[in-house]
Image (tube, rainbow, N blue to C red):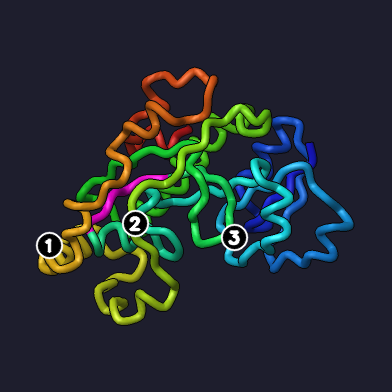
Amino acid sequence: MKILLLGAENSPLIAYLQSMGETVIVTSGPLALDRFMTNLPDFIVSYGYAHPVDAAILERYTGKAVNLHIGYLPWNRGANPNLWSFLENSPKGVTVHCLAAGINTGDIIAQTHVVLTDNDTLRTSDQKLHAAVQILFKRHWMAIRAGKCRYVRQKGKGTCHMPADKATLLPLLTHGWDTPITTLEAYAAAMPAITPFLENEPATSELALVEQHSVLPVPMGDNVKDDVQVEALLTQ
């Protein structure tokens, strides 16, 4: 199968997809519709891709285009999902979902929470989220490519952020990427005005989505629906 990978030229997914017998074409820049139409892929995988995809492409590839997102949708759509999960005390996790019009609005294929510790920084938590979403994607890729997925519409309003939204909060990053997550959590605790949505939002609860709506019929096993632990993330 010919895969168009939207993302970094050195994406870790390249080697995995090739090992599974896929032919991989990588594009990190804007996707030109005319060039795309002259070299049609069989499937589109997006991971860390910063550009919008033309609506005509999305319509043509309904059910054949997925995105890897380091946020627990519907929370933290858009930019800097890891950062906002601390600033707004929202769920930490990762999601594989259908690529669709809008910012991370597509139906969910699989997702899981990721457990972080007080020893984590913004950098290490980001690394763990990326490791987790790659693991989740690899576990389900064969079922995804075969069209044996059970899609679940996102429930609840959730949250969404644009790149510019963090500008006024940059002073909180006292050590840049190495800022402890406890520093960010302390900020969230002192700002109750931004947290009530967690109490009232009717979004999918905890691990129920992973247990009930992950790709089928792939055997799940306990470690697929886990709150991913540090050691497991960084050694797999």
Give the percent coordinates (x, y) of residue 28: 68, 62
Determine the image quadrant of residue 224. Answer: top left
Give the percent coordinates (x, y) of residue 152: 46, 38
Give the percent coordinates (x, y) of residue 16: 65, 37
Q: Residue shown at 76%/45% (left/top)?
A: 24
**Amino acid type of the residue that numbered disc 3 sits on in the rendered structure:** Tyr
* Residue position marked by numbered label 1 in the rendering: 189
**Disc 2 from disc 1: Cα separation:** 22 Å
* Residue position marked by numbered label 2 in the rendering: 157
Mainly helix, strand or loop, the magenta region? loop
**Amino acid type of the residue that numbered disc 2 sits on in the rendered structure:** Lys
Vertical position of residue 34 compared to residue 149: above or below: below
Q: Secondary structure at mark 3?
A: loop
Vertical position of residue 80 compared to residue 199: above or below: below
**Amino acid type of the residue that numbered disc 1 sits on in the rendered structure:** Ala
Vertical position of residue 62 compared to residue 187: above or below: above
**Disc 3 from disc 1: Cα separation:** 32 Å
Residue found at the far bottom of this picture: 168
Q: Residues within 10 Å of mark 2 (few under 14, many from 20)?
A: few
Magenta residues?
A: 89-94
Residue 49 badge: 3
N-terminal of the pair, mark 3 or mark 1, is 3
Between 217 and 56, the residue placed more toward the observer is 56
The answer to the question of whether label 3 and label 2 lie on touching residues, with beta carbons closer than 8 A, is no
